[in-house]
Amino acid sequence: MGATAETDEAIIRAMARGDKGALARAFDRYAATLTRYAWALADDRMDVEEIVQDAFLTLWQRASTLELPADTMLPWLLVVCRNHALNAGRKRIKHRGDELPENLPAPEDHSEARERLRWVRDEIAALPETDRRICELCLLEGRSYAEAAEALGLSVGAVTQRVSRNRRRLKKVVMHDEH
């Protein structure tokens, strides 16, 4: 059997044995199709390239356990590609909420800046005890989520979730209030 007639199953088994050339052959065979599909899912060139690369990385990582339901790996790669695109979209939306608006005006003088800071500190002080301590540790003192989790006896995931929720809450209040 020549290299041109190599089955997808044979390529996957070769990858499972650590054959990087097999990954290159899979890439040559399906990269163009995955790229066209990724363009339908994302509108940024960098996202498209990352989605396709991540799909092939996932293929490489899972080659030893992958069982193809058909004679081709393309349906599996398309599903993986879609999942990576959805994850990239979620990540972009999540980070968009953390960004400050470009037109946020700088305070005219230091007393105005102190007043704004006092107001934000008042909002943090009004939070429930655990949320207040997390904001103080992470947002004001610059501690890591792991440090805050350890200090408060929480999981890092719980701290991450609370910081995100409180940032959204504070941002909403700051953006919609005349303070």
Image: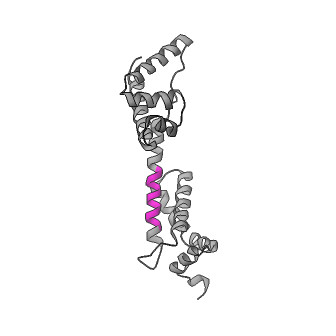
- Extreme-top residue of the structure: 111
In the image, 28: left or right of 72?
A: right
Q: Position of residue 25 (x, y in %)?
A: 60, 74
Q: Is residue 100 visible?
A: no
Closer-to-camera residue (9/89)? 9
The residue at 58%/89% (across/down) is 1
Q: Which residues are magenta?
A: 77-88
Residue at x-position 43% and y-position 64%: 79
The answer to whether one can see residue 11 in this image is yes
Residue occupying the point 51% across, 26% down: 140
Question: Is residue 120 a member of the stretch shown in magenta?
Answer: no
Q: Nearer the viewer, residue 128 or 12?
A: 128
| Quadrant in the picture for the C terminus | top left
Quick check: 1 above or below 59? below
Residue lying farthest to the right in this orientation = 21
How many discs mark residues in the rendered view?
0
Query: Residue 24, how many percent across, how many down?
Result: 61, 71
The image shows residue 115, relative to residue 148, as above or below, that is above
Q: Position of residue 78 (x, y in %)?
A: 45, 65
Instruction: Identify which residue, 14 or 106, lies in the foreground.
Output: 14
Q: Nearer the viewer, residue 143 or 31?
A: 143
Residue 102 x/y as whole percent? 52, 30
